[in-house]
Image (cartoon, rainbow, N blue to C red):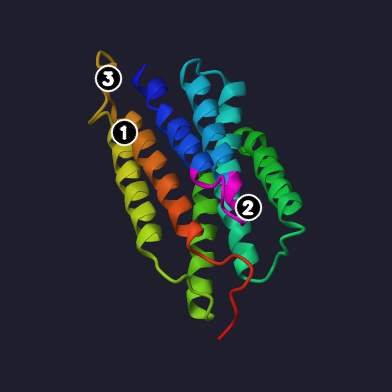
Amino acid sequence: PANTWSNLGFIFGGLLMWWLARNNPTRSMRYFGPASVIVGVTSLVYHASYTFALQFADFVGMFVFVFLLISLNQRRLGQLSAAKHLRVYAAEVIVASALVPVCFQIGLPIQALVAGSIAWLIGQEVVLARTGRRAPSYKWWFAALGCAAAGATCSALDLTRVWCDPHDHLIQGHAMWHILMALSLLCMYRFYATTSLDNAKPA
């Protein structure tokens, strides 16, 4: 139950992002709220059921958010126009999702797809900083990274059974991972809300 209810953080955070973006002139910022809600709903139903089909949906939900950030960075890098953004973003989510059953069949941990996507995301930011397209401020980006790192630590404590009590339905290591990741997504929204997507110029 703790691993299920803790996904409400993604849903409430998504609704907050949706509300914050309502008057934002950049259309892409309005994708953050629905993407976070999708993460929360797919993870919630998976943890309430533990079926492979819903585990697949859980990973699709994660891809929906992480590839939103990756595709926005592609715009900041000048690799993608605003007109093509939605199509490329959708294609990236579809391709990553299609790799989930492939990884399952060959015995590769599915989590490697998410880890690889996050590594790509961080690598993009390094390239942006080195090519004169850095963001005005990185405080929210580092806050998001800090929340994600803390969440990953909690998840590892759950996986190793250090913080995993089957009789505690209020909080678990994995549940805290959900809560901290919901905060991380909210911090990412704040970061991109103050970062130009289409007007960054090379040094």
The amino acid sitting under disc 1 is Met
The amino acid sitting under disc 3 is Leu
Q: Residue at x 56, y 49 (%)?
A: 23
Give x and y (percent) for residue 13: 44, 37
Q: Which residue is mark 2?
A: 28
Is 170 placed above or below 201 here? above
Most foreground residue, 32 or 25? 25
Q: Residue at x 46, y 21 (%)?
A: 47
Is 29 placed above or below 38 here? below
Q: Picture quarter containing residue 200?
A: bottom right
Number of the front mark, 2 or 3: 2
Q: Residue at x 44, y 32 (%)?
A: 12
Furthest residue in direction front, as rendered: 23
The amino acid sitting under disc 2 is Ser
Give x and y (percent) for residue 20: 49, 45
Q: Which residue is mark 1?
A: 176
Q: Which sits earlier in the primary sequence, circle 1 or circle 2?
A: 2
Residue 170: which numbered mark, if any? 3
Q: Are marks 2 and 3 in contact (CB under 8 Å)?
A: no
Q: Residues within 10 Å of mark 1 (few under 14, many from 20)?
A: many
Q: Are marks 1 and 2 in contact (CB under 8 Å)?
A: no
Q: Residues within 10 Å of mark 2 (few under 14, many from 20)?
A: some
Q: Which sits earlier in the primary sequence, circle 1 or circle 3?
A: 3
Indicate the quadrant containing the N terminus: top left, top right, bottom left or bottom right: top left
Q: Is residue 50 visible?
A: yes
Most foreground residue, 75 or 58? 75
Q: Which residues are magenta?
A: 20-31
Give x and y (percent) for residue 175: 34, 29
Q: How many marks?
A: 3
